[in-house]
C-alpha cells in the first residue's frame, strides 16, 4: 500500500519549486492571477523577505506541493491508496484526491493565510521527549490552562500554542519534567482557541464553495481518519482551532497494512516524523509481545497496572531491564500508550518500555549496589 503525504508550514525555503515552475507554466500563471503577485519571484528570489510570513507561506507551499503531485503523476500514474497532509498540506491532499480544483484550493489557502496572519499575537513552542498525557498534566498542575496542544507530530514531538507570556512561563515546568523546549518563530497561536475569530470568518468564506467526491481517501487532521465529502468543509474549519493529529493519522495508516509513504513537496520534514512514529510503534509492539511473568500483574487491566505503578514508585525509581540487565531510572510517571499499553519513559534510553519489561530495584538493593 502507498500513501502520499504533503507538508505544511516550516518546509518552505527560497529556491523551492524552480523546476516545477518551468514545467507547469499554465498553473503558475493561474496562481499569479489568483494571488495578485508572482509566486515564482516569491519562491525563487523572495526580494521582499515575505516567504516566511504566513500570508505568503501558505499559498507558496500549496502551489509547490500541488505541482510536485502533478509531476509525480507524470512519472508514476499508478494508483495510491491514501493521501494525508499536515495542516496546510491537507488542502493539497484534497486537491490530489479530486475533492477540489487547483484554483479552489489556492483560493481557500489564500484566505486562510490572510486570516491567520491577522490573528492576535501569540506564540508556539515545540516540546520534545514528553508524551501528551504528561504534558497535559504538567500544564494543568502549573495553572497553564491557557495553553493548547497545537500539533501532535510524533511521540517525541508535540507543539503547544497560546499567549506569549503563557508559552514563556511554561518552559521551566516542561524542562523540569525532562522535556526539551524550543520556541518557534511564529507570530500567532495557530491551531488553538485563539484562532476562533479567524475560524468564524473562514467558515463564512468556505460556505460558498462546493466539493467533489474523493477519488482517494484523505486523512483529516482533526479526526485522524478518512474524511467524507460532506465533512470536508467542517474539518477544514475545525482545523484552525484544533490540534493536528499527525501521530494518530500515521498510526491509522500503519494499521491498514504494510504502508509505504512518499512526501511530495519541499524538504522531507514529514518523512522524518513518519520514521519516528513507525519506529516508536514497532518498539512498543515488540515490548508488548513480552508477557509479564507476575500472575498478579497480568490480572490487572493496563490502567490498573499504571495506577499501581504510579502510587508505588516515584519518578526517579531505579529499574532493571529484564532482557539486558541494564539499570536505568524512570523519567516520568507510567502512562497509557496507543490506548492500551502500560509504558514508562526511562532516562538514558530514549524510549518507552512496557512495565512488564522492568523490575524496580528495592531501596536496600540500591544501597548494597552503591556500597
Image (cartoon, rainbow, N blue to C red):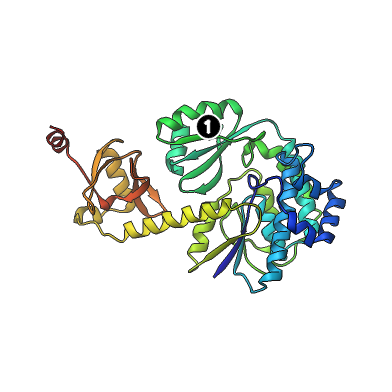
**Residue found 14% across the figure and 33% down from its top:** 367
Residue holding disc 1: 145
Residue drawn at x 43%, y 56% is 279
Q: Nearer the viewer, residue 107 or 229?
A: 107
Q: Residue furthest bottom?
A: 78
Q: Position of residue 338 (x, y in %)?
A: 42, 54
Question: Where's residue 145, x and y in %?
Answer: 53, 32
Instruction: Give me the residue at 78% from left, 62% from top.
Output: 23
185 on left or right of 351: right
Q: Tell me the quadrant of the picture where the N terminus can be found.
A: bottom right
- From the viewer's perspective, tell me whether residue 349 is left or right of residue 3: left
In the rendered view, would you say 313 is above or below 63? above
- Please identify the quadrant where the C terminus is shown: top left
Q: Is residue 45 above or below residue 257?
A: above
User: Would you call the spot at circle 1 few (<14 residues within 10 Å), some (14-19), or many (20 or more)?
Assistant: few
Q: Quadrant of residue 105?
A: bottom right
292 and 238: which one is in front?
A: 292
The answer to which image quadrant residue 77 occupies is bottom right
Q: Is residue 122 visible?
A: yes
Residue 143 visible within the image? no
- In this view, the residue in front, 306 or 81, is 81
Along the viewing direction, whichever of 90 and 227 lies nearer the viewer: 90
Q: Where is residue 310? Give x, y as percent.
A: 30, 40
Q: Residue 214 in the image: x percent, y percent?
A: 69, 67
Amino acid at each position: 500500500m502507498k500513501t502520499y503525504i504533503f507538508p505544511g508550514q516550516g518546509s518552505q525555503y527560497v529556491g523551492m519549486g524552480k523546476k516545477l515552475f518551468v514545467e507547469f507554466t499554465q498553473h503558475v500563471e493561474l496562481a499569479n492571477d489568483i494571488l495578485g503577485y508572482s509566486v515564482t519571484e516569491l519562491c525563487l528570489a523572495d526580494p521582499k523577505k515575505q516567504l516566511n510570513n504566513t500570508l505568503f507561506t501558505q499559498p507558496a507551499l500549496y502551489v509547490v506541493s500541488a505541482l510536485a503531485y502533478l509531476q509525480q503523476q507524470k512519472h508514476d500514474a499508478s494508483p495510491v491508496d491514501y493521501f494525508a497532509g499536515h495542516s496546510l498540506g491537507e488542502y493539497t491532499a484534497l486537491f490530489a484526491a479530486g475533492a477540489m480544483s487547483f484554483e479552489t484550493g489556492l483560493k481557500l489557502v489564500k484566505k486562510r493565510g490572510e486570516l491567520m496572519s491577522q490573528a492576535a499575537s501569540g506564540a508556539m513552542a515545540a516540546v520534545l521527549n514528553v508524551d501528551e498525557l504528561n504534558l497535559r498534566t504538567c500544564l494543568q498542575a502549573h495553572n497553564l490552562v491557557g495553553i493548547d496542544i497545537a500539533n501532535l507530530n510524533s511521540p517525541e514531538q508535540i507543539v503547544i500554542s497560546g499567549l506569549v507570556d503563557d508559552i514563556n512561563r511554561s518552559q521551566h515546568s516542561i524542562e523540569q519534567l525532562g522535556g526539551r523546549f524550543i520556541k518557534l518563530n511564529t507570530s500567532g497561536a495557530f491551531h488553538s482557541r485563539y484562532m476562533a475569530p479567524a475560524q468564524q470568518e473562514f467558515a463564512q468564506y468556505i460556505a460558498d464553495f462546493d466539493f467533489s467526491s474523493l477519488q482517494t481517501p484523505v486523512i483529516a487532521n482533526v479526526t485522524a481518519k478518512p474524511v467524507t465529502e460532506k465533512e470536508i468543509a467542517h474539518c477544514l474549519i475545525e482545523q484552525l482551532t484544533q490540534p493536528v493529529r499527525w501521530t494518530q493519522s500515521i498510526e491509522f495508516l500503519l494499521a491498514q497494512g504494510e504502508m509505504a509513504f512518499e512526501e511530495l513537496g519541499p524538504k522531507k520534514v514529514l518523512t522524518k516524523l513518519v520514521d519516528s512514529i513507525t519506529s516508536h510503534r514497532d518498539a512498543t509492539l515488540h515490548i508488548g509481545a513480552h508477557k509479564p511473568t507476575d500472575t498478579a500483574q497480568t490480572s490487572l487491566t493496563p490502567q490498573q497496572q499504571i495506577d499501581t505503578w504510579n502510587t508505588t514508585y516515584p519518578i526517579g525509581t531505579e529499574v532493571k531491564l529484564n532482557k539486558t540487565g541494564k539499570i536505568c531510572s524512570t523519567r516520568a510517571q507510567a502512562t497509557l500508550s496507543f490506548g492500551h499499553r502500560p509504558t514508562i519513559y526511562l532516562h538514558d534510553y530514549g524510549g518507552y518500555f512496557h512495565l512488564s519489561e522492568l523490575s524496580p530495584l528495592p531501596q536496600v538493593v540500591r544501597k548494597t549496589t552503591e556500597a
